[in-house]
Image (tube, rainbow, N blue to C red):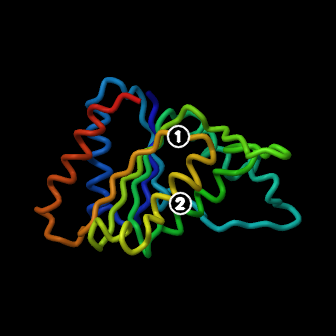
């Protein structure tokens, strides 16, 4: 299994980065995972801004040379892992800009006249590892699970990715020692996952 990790947090001295490290450690100890590629959006200097003008049209996003290497990464991967914080009930603008540009028509999905669009990323799976300052139950009770609905139903299911796993960790500003079980849970999952 080939795995792409998309890490979206501006600080490597953070719990988010510790989660990234545990994903890497578990995956490296997993015989089912044969190759791993990492995309650190902040370190990469990814530009999340959409630009449409006479030279850059929305309908041509699937062939944009500026995002070609990222499209190749998605095509290559069997499993895509997103590691990010939840800010104001949703992923960071950096990650949303990546999604806006990469999950484009004629690459991630295809419009069909008179029919529901066809997802073109079938057969892939996704894992979302997200953190938040508030309690873990906050998105469910106050936001009606908007984060999961956005990521699973609106995005991944639409482009044909049906297998989506979420790890949402709350209370991340608690003392660091209290995060050990959460970090171990991520390591254990990635050590064993096989599809």
Compared to residue 105, the image places residue 93 above or below, namely: below
Which corner quadrant holds the C terminus?
top left
Compared to residue 173, the image places residue 182 above or below, namely: above
Q: Residue at x 70, y 44 (%)?
A: 109
* Residue 58 sits in quarter: bottom right
Between residue 190 and residue 22, name the one nearer to us.
Answer: 190
Q: In the figure, is residue 182 to the left or right of 111?
A: left
Between residue 177 and residue 139, name the one nearer to us.
Answer: 139
Q: Residue at x 17, y 59 (%)?
A: 179
Compared to residue 183, the image places residue 120 above or below, namely: above
Distance of mark 2 from mark 1, alpha carbons? 14 Å
The picture places residue 165, in percent across and down from the top left corner, at 40, 45
Q: Which residue is mark 2?
A: 150
The picture places residue 82, in percent across and down from the top left corner, at 44, 51
Q: Are marks 2 and 1 in contact (CB under 8 Å)?
A: no
Give whichever of discs 2 and 1 has the lower sequence position: 2
* Residue 91 showing in the rendered view: no
Compared to residue 193, the image places residue 71 above or below, namely: below
Which corner quadrant holds the N terminus?
top left
Q: In the figure, is residue 51 to the left or right of 191?
A: right
For numbered disc 1, what is the local secondary structure?
A: loop
The picture places residue 144, in percent across and down from the top left corner, at 44, 68
Q: Give neighbour class at mark 1: few <14, some 14-19, many 20+ (Cα, 10 Å).
A: some
Q: Give neighbour class at mark 2: few <14, some 14-19, many 20+ (Cα, 10 Å).
A: some
Q: Residue at x 81, y 60 (%)?
A: 56
Q: Single out the residue that lies furthest toward the left.
A: 177
Q: Which residue is mark 1?
A: 162
* Residue 139 showing in the rendered view: yes
Q: Residue at x 22, y 39 (%)?
A: 188
For numbered disc 2, what is the local secondary structure?
A: helix
* Residue 88 sits in quarter: bottom left
């Amino acid at each position: 299994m080939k795995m792409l990790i998309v890490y979206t947090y501006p600080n490597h001295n953070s719990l988010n980065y510790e989660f990234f490290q545990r994903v890497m450690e578990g995956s490296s100890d997993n015989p089912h995972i044969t190759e791993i590629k990492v995309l650190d959006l902040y370190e990469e200097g990814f530009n999340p801004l959409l630009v449409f003008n006479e030279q850059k049209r929305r309908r041509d996003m699937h062939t944009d040379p500026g995002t070609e290497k990222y499209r190749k990464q998605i095509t290559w991967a069997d499993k895509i892992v997103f590691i990010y914080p939840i800010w104001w009930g949703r992923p960071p603008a950096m990650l949303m800009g990546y999604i806006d540009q990469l999950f484009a028509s004629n690459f991630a999905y295809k419009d069909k006249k008179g029919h529901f669009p066809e997802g073109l990323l079938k057969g892939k799976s996704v894992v979302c590892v997200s953190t938040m300052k508030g309690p873990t139950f906050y998105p469910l009770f106050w936001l009606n699970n908007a984060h999961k609905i956005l990521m699973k139903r609106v995005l991944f299911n639409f482009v044909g990715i049906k297998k989506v796993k979420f790890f949402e960790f709350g209370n991340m500003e608690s003392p660091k020692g209290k995060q050990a079980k959460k970090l171990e849970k991520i390591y254990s999952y990635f050590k064993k996952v096989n599809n």
